[in-house]
Image (tube, rainbow, N blue to C red):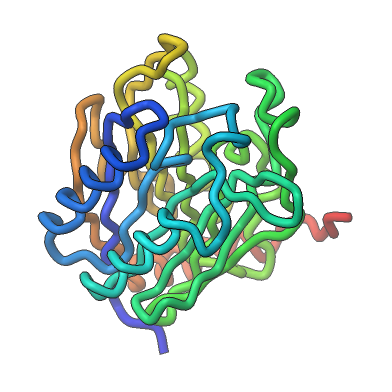
């Protein structure tokens, strides 16, 4: 049976370029200081920034950054999620991990690789969605550029309750970031969580943050602005059920199959 409430902790940092040690140490402080945490969401490629150098930056699934996530989840009795650069089977993946306190780990490999930045030349795409569970809540996990492709996120048969996007989304396209997060919430009648970074990277690309949480009617529940910040938002199952019962729009959705 699903619990009535779920706490999502959004971590919106300034990432030190390709410095795993500095970034993980900083996150450890932020996670330790966060209150009432149940699911902690870190940005895309949170240990490195949006690096196109997987030959130098990638780690295996038993590497130190994954182990760090497991240590944090165990110590704080919460779930840690965010994406890392992972090497597996001779390929590199922009892999989002869902790490539970008991060490069990699920993962999602970013499907839509950002060709505009040559991500498709360095990484292999995934082909399966991940819908995880916590406290009876179903959580669909996606990465950055996936946000532009609504078919991949479609909540057919109400498969999930919360849709999470981890990102390194540039300030120059921040209007699209805010608009598409809200649109995904409205069309899927689910909570949508978007976690982005702030600051700039080695290519002088500016990131404005603007992480946020939207309710199943698209209503903003939290908007984090453009500074480094950590914020916990409580989601209500009653609000979700009320929306879906009073406005059963998903029942009228087109049926389709992704090949």
- Extreme residue in the top direction: 204
**Where in the figure is residue 196, as x and y percent of width and height?**
38, 35
In the figure, is residue 140 to the left or right of 178?
Answer: right
Instruction: Please identify the quarter of the rendering in which residue 146 is found.
Output: top right
Q: Is residue 136 above or below residue 89?
A: below
Between residues 102 and 132, which one lies in front from this camera angle?
102
In the figure, is residue 231 to the left or right of 197?
Answer: left
Point out the image quarter for the C terminus: bottom right
Between residues 60 and 225, which one lies in front from this camera angle?
60
| Res 96 seen here | yes
- Extreme residue in the bottom direction: 1
Q: How many dots with numbers?
A: 0
**Where in the figure is residue 30, as x and y percent of width and height?**
17, 49
Q: Residue at x 58, y 29 (%)?
A: 53
Q: Is residue 178 above or below residue 24?
A: above
In the figure, is residue 91 to the left or right of 110?
Answer: right
Point out the image quarter for the N terminus: bottom left
Instruction: Please identify the quarter of the rendering in which residue 67 is found.
Output: bottom left
Q: Is residue 251 above or below residue 209?
A: below
Between residues 21 and 94, which one lies in front from this camera angle?
21
- Extreme residue in the front direction: 56
Q: Residue at x 32, y 31 (%)?
A: 15
**Where in the figure is residue 13, as x and y percent of width and height?**
27, 35
| Res 6 seen here | no
Q: Residue at x 71, y 24 (%)?
A: 115
**Where in the figure is residue 121, as x and y percent of width and height?**
75, 28
Q: Residue at x 58, y 39 (%)?
A: 147
């Amino acid at each position: 049976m699903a619990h009535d409430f779920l706490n999502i902790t959004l971590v919106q940092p300034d990432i030190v370029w390709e410095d795993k040690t500095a970034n993980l140490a900083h996150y450890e402080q932020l996670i330790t200081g966060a209150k009432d945490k149940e699911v902690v969401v870190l940005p895309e490629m949170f240990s490195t920034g949006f690096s196109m150098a997987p030959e130098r930056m990638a780690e295996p699934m038993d590497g130190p950054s994954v182990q760090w996530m497991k240590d944090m989840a165990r110590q704080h009795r919460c779930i840690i999620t965010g994406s890392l650069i992972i090497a597996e089977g001779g390929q590199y993946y922009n892999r989002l991990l869902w790490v539970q306190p008991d060490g069990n780990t699920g993962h999602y490999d970013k499907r839509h690789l950002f060709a505009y930045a040559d991500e498709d030349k360095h990484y292999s795409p995934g082909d399966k969605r991940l819908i995880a569970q916590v406290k009876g809540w179903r959580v669909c996990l996606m990465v950055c550029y996936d946000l532009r492709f609504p078919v991949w996120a479609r909540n057919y048969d109400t498969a999930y309750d919360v849709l999470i996007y981890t990102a390194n989304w540039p300030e120059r396209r921040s209007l699209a970031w805010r608009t598409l997060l809200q649109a995904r919430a409205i069309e899927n009648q689910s909570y949508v969580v978007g976690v982005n970074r702030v600051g700039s990277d080695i290519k002088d690309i500016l990131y404005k943050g603007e992480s946020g949480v939207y309710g199943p009617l698209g209503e903003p529940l939290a908007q984090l602005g453009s500074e480094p910040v950590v914020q916990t938002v409580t989601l209500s199952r009653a609000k979700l059920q009320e929306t879906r019962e009073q406005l059963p729009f998903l029942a009228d959705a087109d049926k389709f199959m992704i090949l």
